[in-house]
Image (cartoon, helix red, strand yellow):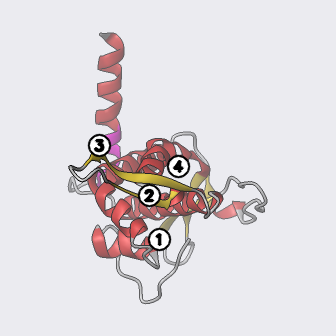
């Protein structure tokens, strides 16, 4: 019982900490979480061999003895994406807050290197504190919960500029950018 109350209190605290004074979503945190989510998702998709496929469709056999089944690339299958999305928000602790000294705009940058990547060189601009990723993780989980179908759809359509499509056009979490960029 005590653990359940502790989790509820933590969830409430995270909910309040991810909101600004007016009780609305902190746009910079949610935008940063959306872009980080897309970055991590694209990284996972690129790791999968494009030749690997998975059977999808109905397991039912129709009266004429046929089965409606087809093969799709594993990395774009709902099965694979569901598995990836289950734990992807745990990687938000690999991102840290960066504040532009001139504009004071907050962005989140990945500082933890992946295999075959360089370490983020400009550590002076990053603010490290132990709970910095918690609002980002909460925002990531909220985005997945709210936009999971759109994520599946965009990836199935092989949408270009996934970050712009999901984070600006579909969700409105980021202001529309004049140039399309992938993380």
Q: Would you name the residue on which mark 4 appears?
A: 92
Kindly indicate whether the residue at mark 2 contacts the one at mark 4 (C-beta within 8 angstroms): yes
Give the residue pinned by disc 1.
105
Q: Nearer the viewer, residue 152 or 36?
A: 152
- Name the secondary structure under disc 4: helix
Q: Toward the viewer: 8 or 179? A: 179
- Which label sits on residue 16? 3
Disc 3 crowd rating (10 Å Cα; few below 14, some 14-19, many 20+) is some
Q: Residue 7, relative to residue 48: is it above or below?
A: above
* Disc 4: CA contacts within 10 A as few (<14), some (14-19) or many (>=20): many
Residue that appears at 58% across and 54% down: 95
Give the labeled residue for mark 2: 33
Image quadrant in which the N terminus is located: top left
Q: How far apart are marks 1 and 2 (CA)?
A: 15 Å
Which SS class for mark 1? loop
The magenta segment is 14-20
Element at label 3: helix
Between discs 1 and 2, the one toward the N terminus: 2
Q: Does the magenta stretch include residue 26?
A: no
Question: Is tag 4's residue or tag 3's residue first in the polypeptide sequence?
Answer: 3
- In the rendered structure, which disc, 3 or 2, sits on the residue that comes first in sequence? 3
Which residue is painted at 27% across and 53% down in the image? 146
């Amino acid at each position: 019982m005590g653990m359940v109350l502790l989790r509820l209190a933590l969830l409430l605290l995270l909910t309040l900490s991810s909101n600004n004074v007016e009780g609305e979503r902190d746009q910079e945190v949610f935008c940063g979480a959306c872009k980080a989510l897309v970055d991590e998702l694209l990284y996972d998709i690129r790791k999968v061999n494009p030749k690997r496929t998975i059977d999808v469709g109905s397991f039912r056999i129709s009266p004429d003895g046929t089965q409606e089944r087809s093969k799709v690339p594993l990395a774009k299958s709902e099965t694979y994406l569901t598995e990836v999305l289950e734990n992807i928000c745990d990687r938000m602790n690999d991102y840290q807050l960066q504040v532009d000294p001139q504009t004071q705009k907050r962005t989140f940058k990945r500082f933890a290197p992946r295999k075959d990547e360089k370490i983020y060189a400009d550590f002076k601009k990053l603010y490290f504190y132990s709970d910095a990723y918690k609002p980002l993780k909460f925002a990531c989980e909220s985005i997945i919960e709210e936009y999971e179908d759109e994520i599946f759809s965009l990836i199935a359509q092989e949408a270009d500029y996934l970050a712009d499509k999901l984070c600006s056009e579909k969700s409105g979490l980021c202001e529309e950018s004049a140039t399309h960029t992938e993380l």
